[in-house]
């Protein structure tokens, strides 16, 4: 089945065309036929990029004024680039949807009821869900005959027990406003956990894992027998690890103090917390780990501090989740930083030999942007690098939902 995977943002649509079926999933032989994006939607300088491997990327700049026009152009481009002979070959659409609240613990075909429930979650993810929903509306217009499936970032973490997701607030806030920890990046954590088990030939019940997704946003998850039992992001993606531009865990009273000192509004605070904190805030320089590593190598103390805070926070969570799980079999690094920054992996794991976590310097240095074990041969806890592939999991979930097959967590 050929599936169009969509990730719809405020002014962009990212897409992949993936072919999958039961045999291909079993053999891990799903095929990414094409990938691309439309950016700067709403302007006369929108860029449409399509790559159909092994051909080079085709890039055009044109006027694309709304998301519907953007999707129509993207689909037409798939035909022009011979990714499909005819649009009718696209048999389903899978949407990344950030927030599924407590309603969705798995991927679902979108019908009127599901649409309404996603709509109800807009309040919980005002920066993302409206755009994800827009993706659904425009896909329904451009490809009306095709089933559409929602795959939620939060769904994987719905298995967390109440002790992990309830905040120490008056319980009525949970009842009235659904204030609780939801967790995000679920598709990524679920994918790398699946890959880990596949690599080692394990059943879901046979592996307890800690998975660290370190990209622009960062989160870390404790997975017991295939189920998320705790994760570092909370009510919003603000909680937990230090990130590119978000501060992660912080004493909330510090925020009131800043607001009163600098006379900031709620809107100012939201901007500060989303755009000016984290690696960028501490270094005063960049949110990109590559820049900070280069600056640190030149002796820049602020960059060095930002990296240290970043890695120390990861280490604390690894320790905490080791305790939560009781027994850890594997630790997985993924995301742009997790896949490409050996120095971060080494620093985050430093001094944890007593917990059974070790990193082999040569293996670590040699594992860049590819799958591989970075712990020494024979280690009890396997420390792994596994590039994430959320789109693949969205395609597989979409296929299974359309066929009425169960979606493994
Ligand atoms: P997103 O969370 O937006 O999907 P990615 O997972 O692609 O982002 O991660 C992007 C981040 O990965 C960049 O901001 C950068 O900090 C980091 N990164 C990418 N390549 C490298 C590298 N070679 N070394 C260190 N960090 C890297």
Image (cartoon, rainbow, N blue to C red):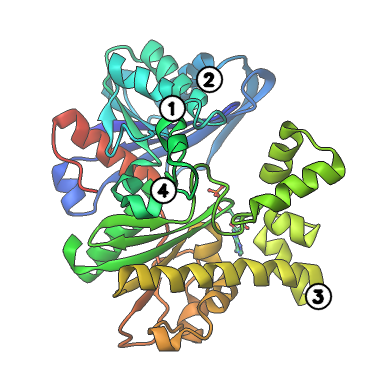
Is 66 situated left or right of 288 in this image?
Answer: left
Residue in the image at 43% along x and 47% along y: 183
Instruction: Tell me the distance, in whole angstroms, between the alpha carbons under discs 1 and 3.
Output: 46 Å
Element carrying mark 3: loop
Location of the N terminus (image quadrant): top left
Secondary structure beneath label 1: loop
Q: Which mark is residue 121?
A: 1
Find residue 166 and name its label.
Answer: 4
Q: Is residue 389 visible?
A: no
Q: What residue is shown at x 71% (from left), y 66% (from top)?
A: 306
Q: Is tag 1's residue or tag 3's residue first in the polypeptide sequence?
A: 1
Which residue is disc 3 drawn over? 298
Near-viewer residue (199 or 104): 104
**Residue 70 badge:** 2
50 on left or right of 285: left
Point out the tag, 4 or 2, that comes first from the N-terminus.
2
The reply to whether the C-beta atoms of the residues labelled 4 and 2 are less than 8 Å apart is no
Q: Earlier in the sequence, mark 1 or mark 4?
A: 1
Q: Position of residue 310 (x, y in %)?
A: 62, 66
CA–CA distance between discs 3 and 4?
44 Å
């Amino acid at each position: 089945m050929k599936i169009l995977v969509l990730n719809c943002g405020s002014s962009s649509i990212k897409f992949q065309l993936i072919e999958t079926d039961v045999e291909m999933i079993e053999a891990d032989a799903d095929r990414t036929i094409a990938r691309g994006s439309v950016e700067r939607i709403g302007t006369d300088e929108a860029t449409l990029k399509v790559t159909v491997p092994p051909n080079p990327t085709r890039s055009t700049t044109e006027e694309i004024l709304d998301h519907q026009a953007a999707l129509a152009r993207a689909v037409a481009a798939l035909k022009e680039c011979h990714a499909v002979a005819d649009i009718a070959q696209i048999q389903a659409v899978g949407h990344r949807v950030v927030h599924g609240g407590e309603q969705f613990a798995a991927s679902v075909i979108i019908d009127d009821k599901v649409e309404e429930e996603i709509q109800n979650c807009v309040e919980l993810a005002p920066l993302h869900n409206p755009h994800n929903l827009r993706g659904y509306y425009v896909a329904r217009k451009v490809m009306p005959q095709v089933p559409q499936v929602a795959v939620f970032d939060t769904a994987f973490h719905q298995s967390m027990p109440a002790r992990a997701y309830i905040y120490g607030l008056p319980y009525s806030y949970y009842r009235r406003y659904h204030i609780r920890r939801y967790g995000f990046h679920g598709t990524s954590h679920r994918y790398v956990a699946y890959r880990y088990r596949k690599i080692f030939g394990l059943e879901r019940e046979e592996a307890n894992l800690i998975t660290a997704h370190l990209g622009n946003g960062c989160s870390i998850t404790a997975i017991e027998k295939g189920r998320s039992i705790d994760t570092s992001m909370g009510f919003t993606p603000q909680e937990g690890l230090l990130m590119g531009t978000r501060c992660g865990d912080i004493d909330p009273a510090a925020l009131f103090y800043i607001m009163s000192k600098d006379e900031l509004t709620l809107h100012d605070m939201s901007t500060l917390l989303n755009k000016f904190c984290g690696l960028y805030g501490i270094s005063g320089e960049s949110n990109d780990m590559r820049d900070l590593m280069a600056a640190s190598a030149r002796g820049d103390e602020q960059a060095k501090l930002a990296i240290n805070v970043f890695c120390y926070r990861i280490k604390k969570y690894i320790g905490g989740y080791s305790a939560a799980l009781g027994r850890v079999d594997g630790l997985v690094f993924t995301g742009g930083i997790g896949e490409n920054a050996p120095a971060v992996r080494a620093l985050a794991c430093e001094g944890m030999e007593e917990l059974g976590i070790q990193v082999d310097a040569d293996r670590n240095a040699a594992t860049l942007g590819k799958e591989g074990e970075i712990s020494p041969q024979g280690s009890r806890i396997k420390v792994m690098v596994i590039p994430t592939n959320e789109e693949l999991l969205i395609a597989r979930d979409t296929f299974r939902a359309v066929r009425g097959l169960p979606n493994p967590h």
